[in-house]
Image (cartoon, rainbow, N blue to C red):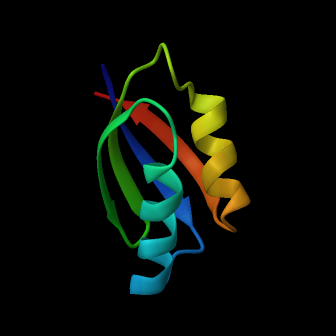
Amino acid sequence: MKRAKVNVNGMHCGGCVSSVERVLGRLPGVAERAVAVGSVEITFDEALLDEAALRAAIDDAGFEVTSVSYA
């Protein structure tokens, strides 16, 4: 399992948080996620999900990933 912190632009409210939570919940390999306005902390199976797919899912939801750092 890999743990990452993702900074996200464009999230301004609880509705935005819910949208990102919903999108991440649909991705294969996501074990845990904690979404707040502007950031996501996520634990995922890197055999099932890579950074490009994670970024694409958030971008497709209408938000912009500005950085990803790994713990």
Q: Is residue 20 left or right of residue 4?
A: right
| Above or below, 6 relative to 52 | below
Residue at the image position 42 percent from the left and 62 percent from the top:
21
Return the x and y of residue 17 as percentages of the image width and height.
Answer: 42, 73
| Above or below, 64 relative to 54 | below
How many numbered marks have been drawn onto this rendered protein structure? 0
Q: Residue furthest top?
A: 47
- Quadrant where the N terminus is found in the figure: top left
Residue at the image position 49 percent from the left and 33 percent from the top:
28
Quarter of the figure with residue 13: bottom left
- Quadrant where the C terminus is found in the figure: top left
Quarter of the figure with residue 18: bottom left
Residue 13 seen in this snapshot: no
Return the x and y of residue 34 as percentages of the image width and height.
Answer: 28, 56
Residue at the image position 57 percent from the left and 30 percent from the top:
51
Q: Is residue 41 left or right of residue 28?
A: left
Residue 7 seen in this snapshot: yes
Quarter of the figure with residue 38: bottom left
Return the x and y of residue 30 as percentages of the image width and height.
Answer: 39, 37
Q: Is residue 40 left or right of residue 27?
A: left
| Above or below, 68 relative to 33 | above
Return the x and y of residue 65 as percentages of the image width and height.
Answer: 60, 52
